[in-house]
């Protein structure tokens, strides 16, 4: 077994429009080690989010391979990719993508429900994560009843509830005011250390990126 939880080789993504060929990503090579925190920075439109979507199997590359827990995404069916994402990956987005009709507890429980975990174990795990993110007294509140910072904490708890090998975070504090962003970000980093989870975080904020183990930059579709 190699030492990488996630790896991509010669990853490229090309789009075509009326103007012709647009090469968003060119021959990207990246290896993520266990418990490693990587920040990817770059100008708006540089392909940061596209790279994250490819790494998570949410989009298909034009060329190259992606391997998660020694499984190549190209060899898997869509159902197998869904199972792999549920088992090995967590996702945190700039906009929380929580289900508004459900409570905080129900939202965090969802990945384990999909996995088929026993109800008692689901409740205990979801409650534990929500307590860790400071929402012990907000378990039964629906998403619309929570502040922006609280919603993002729920999203972080949901991303970690399955004990993933790696969390892919796309501007996780980009939709928050500076004070809440700092609180949520510190919480995210604390939980990353506690759970020994690898993280690939896309951010435009160099101050955030400086706190990572490695800082990489996307320039003209290449990773430097």
Image (tube, rainbow, N blue to C red):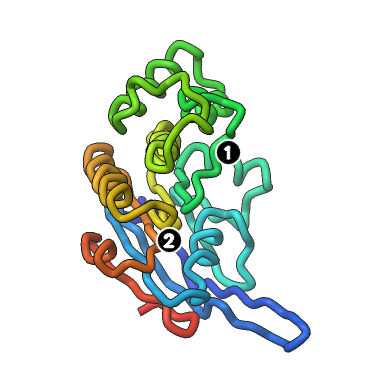
Q: Residue furthest right?
A: 18
Total marks shown come to 2
Q: Residue at x 58, y 33 (%)?
A: 100
Quarter holding the C terminus?
bottom left
Q: Position of residue 221 (x, y in %)?
A: 49, 80
Q: Quadrant of residue 72?
A: bottom right
Q: What percent of the width, then of the height, locates residue 123?
A: 44, 16
Which of disc 1 and disc 2 is earlier in sequence?
A: 2
Crowd around label 2: few <14 · some 14–19 · many ≥20 (10 Å):
many
Q: Is residue 164 visible?
A: no
Decide: is 80 above or below 93. above
Q: Badge 1 local density, few (<14 within 10 Å), some, or many (20+)?
A: some
Residue under pointer 2? 7
Which secondary structure, mark 1?
helix
The dot on residue 83 is 1
Residue drawn at point x = 38 percent, y = 42 percent: 149
Q: Is residue 78 above or below residue 103?
A: below
Q: Nearer the viewer, residue 39 or 77?
A: 39
Q: Nearer the viewer, residue 207 or 87?
A: 207
Q: Position of residue 65 (x, y in %)?
A: 54, 65
Query: Would you identify the image quadrant in which residue 54 lies?
Result: bottom right
Label 2 SS: strand
Distance of mark 2 from mark 1, alpha carbons? Answer: 18 Å
Pick whichever, 220 or 104, lies toward us. 104
Q: What mark, if any, has residue 179 been given in the picture? A: none
Task: Answer left or right for 182 relative to 2.
Answer: left
Q: Measuring from the top left, give residue 10's x and y in whole percent.
A: 50, 74
Residue 135 makes an appearance in the image: yes
Q: Residue at x 60, y 42 (%)?
A: 82
Residue at (54% x, 38% y) in the render: 98
- Compared across the picture, whether 131 is left or right of 139 comes to left
Residue contact between numbered discs 2 and 1, judged by CB atoms under 8 Å: no
């Amino acid at each position: 077994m190699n030492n990488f939880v996630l790896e991509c080789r010669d990853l490229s993504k090309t789009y075509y429009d009326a103007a012709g060929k647009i090469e968003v990503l060119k021959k990207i090579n990246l290896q993520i080690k266990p418990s490693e925190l990587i920040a990817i920075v770059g100008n708006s439109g540089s392909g940061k989010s596209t790279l994250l979507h490819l790494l998570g199997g949410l989009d298909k590359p034009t060329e190259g391979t992606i391997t998660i827990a020694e499984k190549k995404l190209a060899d898997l069916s869509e159902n197998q990719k869904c199972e792999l994402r549920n088992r090995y990956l967590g996702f945190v987005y700039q906009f929380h993508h929580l289900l508004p009709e459900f409570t905080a507890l129900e939202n965090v429980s969802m990945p384990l429900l999909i996995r088929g975990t026993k109800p008692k174990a689901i409740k205990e795990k979801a409650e534990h994560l929500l307590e860790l993110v400071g929402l012990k007294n907000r378990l039964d509140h629906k998403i619309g009843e929570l502040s922006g910072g609280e919603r993002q904490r729920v999203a972080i708890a949901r991303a970690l509830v399955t004990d993933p090998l790696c969390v892919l975070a796309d501007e996780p504090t980009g939709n928050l005011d500076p004070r809440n962003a700092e609180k949520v970000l510190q919480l995210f980093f604390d939980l990353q250390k506690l759970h020994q989870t690898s993280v690939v975080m896309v951010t435009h904020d160099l101050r955030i990126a400086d706190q990572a183990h490695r800082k990489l930059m996307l320039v003209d579709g290449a990773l430097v």
